[in-house]
């Protein structure tokens, strides 16, 4: 068992080293700026909604608020984007909770739905307005008809595929 644990640590260290090499190749200054982040994720400069969405994501990873991502912030971002469902849902909730109170109110959910609607929902077969989508999310997820807690968010997303597809941050990197 100790040998297996050691092997996993070596793989993790090898993966971190690989990420470091890629990061330093792409960001020789040691810092990833917002415009580079947008380029990685293929966000066209003409799309206000997608740009705002990616800026919000970038800012959530910029933990020291220096307007750049250093290597550790970059690795943490990749871990969340590529990580397990539970981590991605927790992170998504944190992103949507714009006032940071630990609950999602209708205003926060409508803001999110409007952005997602402009980015990807208008391309799908959903014939609902952003307000109708918000109402449906609350109907499916909110258990006590007030605000959505992290627990309600996690449980609701995992038990309803429609909610899951809508709520989980699905960042599609192009490179």
Image (cartoon, helix red, strand yellow):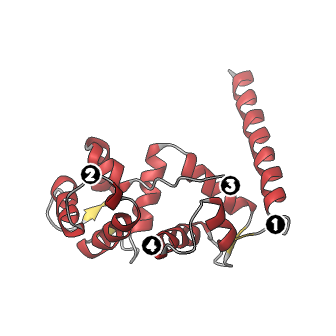
Point out which mark residue 17 bears.
none
Identify the element where label 3 is drawn.
helix
Regarding residue 88, the answer to whether it shows in the image is: yes
Task: Estimate the x, y position of residue 116 in percent, counting from the top left.
Answer: 37, 64
Q: Nearer the viewer, mark 2 or mark 1?
A: 2
Residue ID for mark 2: 125
Q: Residue at x 65, y 73 (%)?
A: 34
The N terminus - image quarter: top right
Q: Residues within 10 Å of mark 1 (few under 14, many from 20)?
A: some
Q: Residues within 10 Å of mark 3 (few under 14, many from 20)?
A: some
Quadrant of res 70: bottom right
Q: State the separation of the CA atoms marked 4 and 1.
A: 28 Å
- The answer to which of marks 3 and 1 sits earlier in the sequence is 1
Q: Nearer the viewer, mark 4 or mark 2?
A: 2
Point out which mark residue 75 bears.
3
Task: Estimate the x, y position of residue 144 in percent, counting from the top left.
Answer: 14, 60
Task: Estimate the x, y position of residue 115 in percent, counting from the top left.
Answer: 38, 70
Quadrant of res 15: top right
- Position of residue 164 in the picture relative to residue 42 (left or right): left
Q: Nearer the viewer, residue 51 or 156?
A: 51
Q: Residues within 10 Å of mark 4 (few under 14, many from 20)?
A: some
């Amino acid at each position: 068992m100790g040998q297996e644990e050691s092997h996993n640590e070596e793989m993790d260290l090898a993966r971190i080293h690989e990420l470091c090499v890629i990061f330093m190749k792409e960001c020789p200054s040691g810092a990833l700026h917002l415009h580079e982040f947008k380029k990685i994720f293929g966000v066209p400069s003409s799309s206000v909604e997608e740009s705002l969405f990616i800026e919000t994501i970038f800012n959530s990873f910029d933990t020291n608020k220096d307007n750049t991502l250093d290597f550790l912030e970059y690795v943490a971002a990749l871990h969340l984007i590529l990580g397990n469902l539970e981590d991605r849902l927790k992170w998504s909730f944190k992103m949507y909770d714009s006032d940071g109170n630990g609950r999602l109110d209708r205003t926060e959910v409508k803001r999110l739905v409007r952005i997602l609607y402009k980015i990807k929902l208008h391309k799908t077969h959903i014939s609902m307005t952003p307000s109708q989508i918000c109402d449906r999310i609350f109907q499916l997820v909110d258990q006590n008809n007030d605000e959505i807690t992290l627990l309600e968010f996690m449980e609701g997303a995992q038990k309803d595929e429609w909610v899951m597809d809508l709520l989980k941050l699905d960042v599609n990197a192009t490179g």
